[in-house]
Image (tube, rainbow, N blue to C red):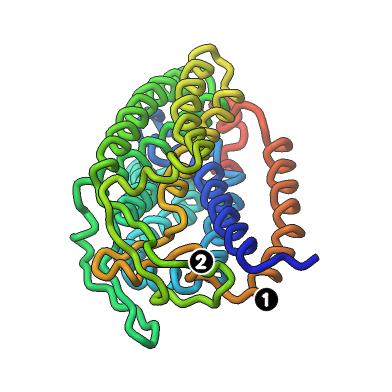
Amino acid sequence: MIIDYPTLKVIWWLLVGVLLVGFAIMDGHDMGVGTLLPFVGRDDVERRVVINTVGPHWDGNQVWFITGGGAIFAAWPLVYATAFSGFYWAMLAVLWALFFRPVGFDYRSKLHSPTWRKTWDWGLFVGGAVPPLIFGVAFGNLLQGVPFNFDNNLVSYYTGSFWGLLNPFALLTGVVSTAMITFHGAIYLMHRTEGDIQRRSRNAALIFGVLLLAGFSAAGVWLQWIPGYVITSTIDPSALPDPLAKEVAREAGAWMHNYQTMPATMALPVLAYLGTIAALLLALKGRTLSAFVASSLTIVGVIGTAGASMFPFVMPSSSDPRSSLTVWDSVSSHLTLSIMFFATLIFMPIIITYTSWAYRVMSGKVTAAYVRENSHSAY
């Protein structure tokens, strides 16, 4: 079966989105649990209960992060090169924060010192809270445009600074991302714990669920006044990648055009609202597994809304709009996308199958009694 080049470009836009959503759902609830760790666990045993809800899975879930980065590298090499050079210090901050996770999980309970354990608890907090904040800030900057341009040899030059990334709108989207992930983690904790920890997790879910709805709404209103990007020249979807072979203009409200031309995309922001509200109501009724599914749909809606708003842009340029990277001109060759697509058809079901099996085998509540009985083997 041979798939034409334009179709493959769109397929890989969707697949990269699926990998980002998968990362946010699977590794996201781990990060949300880490963010809540110092607050829902009041003593050492309670914090060990919290850690052991994600202990068996966190490293497997991080495969989604690695796979997503690899897919961007292979499918969108220009995006990978431009983003990772422009957002260099931000990406390093993510990696530095993630360093706390493997070391924190493995070393935290090795010593009985309260100071040692409390230090690693806050390390796990940093590893859980910082990445979603920075990823949200990055999305906020993408929606505003990133200051970079290409020369005639397609060498990119980034003209911004790290501090320039921390603008008001980007900080708002960072709050939305953090609230979304923490809300997701709180719902997961409700499902895996009981008693006081579950009660505190429910309170956290209420707080961050409301914060998510408020922040998402504020960002949507604000986005209508932020100049978006529109391709004003003819595009050949079958052409080889060349970001400079088009003309791009900035227009106020341009990020809302897709919702007018493709009304079906309105389902994504609606899903974000309905998923959050449904997760809150189900959590209050004690139907925690259904609430977790609903909060996962919230993530699909929030990330999908950002993607649908920007399509076909992937990384707009604020300093030279013509250099903006799109689905059509930032991809790899037809052969590369084809090989990757068929490899994905083989390996993605395998990943989903073994992940589902692992969660089924290691399901159930994590309790203080379990931690005490398995003090030397549990995290």
User: Is residue 349 shown above or below 335?
Assistant: above
Instruction: Give the amino acid type for the residue marked by disc 1 in the picture.
Output: Leu
Residue 50 visible from this viewpoint: no
Would you name the residue on which mark 1 appears? 335
> In the displayed image of the protein, which residue is found farthest to the right?
1
x, y percent for residue 257: 39, 45
x, y percent for residue 166: 21, 54
Q: Nearer the viewer, residue 160 or 377?
A: 160
Q: Nearer the viewer, residue 187 or 33?
A: 187
How many discs appear? Answer: 2
User: Is residue 322 shown above or below 258?
Assistant: below
Please give the label number shown on residue 323: none
Residue 64, picture quadrant? bottom right
Q: Is residue 41 left or right of residue 69?
A: left
Which element carries disc 1, helix, strand or loop?
helix
Q: The N terminus is located in which quarter?
A: bottom right
Q: Nearer the viewer, residue 336 or 245?
A: 245
x, y percent for residue 248: 34, 64
Q: Nearer the viewer, residue 292 or 231?
A: 231
Residue 23 visible from this viewpoint: yes
Image point 61% across, 65% down: which residue? 6
Q: Is residue 50 left or right of residue 41?
A: right
How far apart in space, not on screen, are marks 2 and 1 (Cα)?
15 Å
Q: The C terminus is located in which quarter?
A: top right
Would you name the residue on which mark 2 appears? 328
